[in-house]
Image (cartoon, helix red, strand yellow):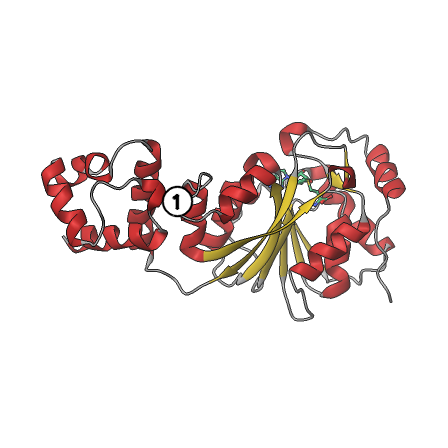
């Protein structure tokens, strides 16, 4: 049986029947253009055999497009009304039972997904997009790639390289697990309601781990410290860790890092080099 996609009219009808007034606090801007959903699925290269995790399926426009490409989707939705409606919508659009698994919860609180998820594809709730994305990468190492739609400003930060103006904590942390690529921009007109920010698609591919969990935690602490005081030099920022700026200078130099540099010029590999040296002490 073929799976049909949702149109703008039906999305509004479902919202009306649920008496749903899209909530800004939950980032509820629904995609009402099926071409955009199919484009996202193509960009994510979803194939049969993939187990896709979608955060915030909403009314289900992207969910149905995903289910056209694979028979295994897990959708995590915080809004109870939407989580209850989604299986009904899926069934009426030709999705066979068992292809869609729904978790009605806050994605930040989900530590277990039955099965082995392989891809993450989502139009993320904008207010929590970075923490949700980073926690998914941390908790589910079997997710090897994905595509997320986020606010353009956030997309640029996620994909930024060291030395660029937009490079910061999200860029350095996301790079611990993945290569992030700014893939495309998305018109405001494909959403209902129309958001007051621009949106873009980011594609990611997981690379070999840079180290174990202990090293990651130390590295992330170094990243947080470095960007918490962007203007200071690293030898000053890390002086309390090393017990003085003189010792910090020596230690940084022996890890191959210029002690007078600032966090914004350091790749995650360089933060990890400092972390390795700290871990050995
Ligand atoms: N995927 C749908 C689409 O493209 O039309 C909806 C995307 S909308 C930008 C974000 C969705 O995430 C909403 O359905 C909202 O209820 C849900 N949401 C918001 N915060 C969430 C959270 N912490 N965990 C899970 N879902 C969340």
Pick the front one: 170 or 56: 170
Q: Identify which residue is drawn at 19% across, 39% down.
A: 235
Label 1 belongs to which residue? 163
Pick the front one: 234 or 19: 234
Image quadrant in which you'd find residue 265 = top left
Where residue 158 sits in the image (x, y, percent)? 50, 46
- Report whether residue 254 is seen: yes
In the rendered view, does 59 fall on the left or right side of 258? right
In the rendered view, does 169 fall on the left or right side of 238? right
Q: Is mark 1 within 8 Å of ligand 1?
A: no
For numbered disc 1, what is the local secondary structure? loop
Label 1 crowding class (10 Å Cα cut-off): few <14, some 14-19, many 20+?
some
Q: Identify which residue is drawn at 68% across, 63% down.
A: 72
Pick the front one: 203 or 31: 203
Where residue 116 sits in the image (x, y, percent)? 56, 64
- How many discs mark residues in the rendered view? 1
Q: Identify which residue is drawn at 21% across, 54% down.
A: 256
- Report whether residue 104 is seen: no
Where residue 234 sits in the image (x, y, percent)? 24, 39
In the rendered view, does 78 fall on the left or right side of 19? left
The N terminus, quarter of image: bottom right
- Ligand 1 occupies quarter: top right
């Amino acid at each position: 049986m073929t799976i049909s996609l949702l149109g703008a009219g039906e999305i509004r009808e479902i919202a009306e029947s649920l008496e749903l007034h899209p909530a800004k606090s939950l980032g509820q801007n629904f995609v009402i253009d099926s071409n955009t959903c199919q484009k996202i699925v193509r960009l994510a290269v979803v194939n049969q055999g993939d187990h896709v995790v979608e955060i915030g399926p909403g009314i289900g426009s992207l969910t149905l497009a995903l289910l056209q490409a694979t028979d295994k989707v897990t959708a995590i939705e915080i809004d109870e009304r939407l989580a209850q409606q989604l299986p009904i919508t899926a069934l009426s659009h030709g999705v066979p039972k068992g292809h869609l698994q729904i978790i009605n919860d806050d994605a930040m609180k989900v530590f277990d997904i039955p099965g082995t998820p392989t891809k993450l594809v989502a139009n993320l709730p904008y207010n929590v997009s970075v923490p949700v994305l980073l926690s998914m990468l941390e908790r589910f190492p079997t997710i090897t790639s994905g595509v997320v739609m986020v606010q353009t400003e956030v997309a640029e930060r996620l994909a930024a390289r060291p030395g660029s103006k937009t490079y910061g904590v999200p860029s350095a942390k996301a790079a611990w697990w993945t290569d992030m690529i700014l893939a495309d921009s998305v018109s405001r007109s494909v959403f209902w309601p129309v958001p007051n920010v621009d949106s873009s698609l980011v594609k990611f591919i997981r690379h070999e781990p840079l180290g174990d969990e202990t090293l990651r935690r130390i590295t992330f602490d170094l990243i947080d410290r470095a960007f918490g005081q962007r203007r200071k030099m690293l030898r000053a920022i890390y002086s309390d860790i090393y017990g003085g700026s003189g010792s910090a200078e020596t230690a940084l130099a022996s890890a191959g890092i210029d002690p007078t540099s600032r966090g914004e010029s350091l790749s995650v590999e360089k933060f990890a080099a400092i972390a390795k040296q700290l871990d050995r002490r």
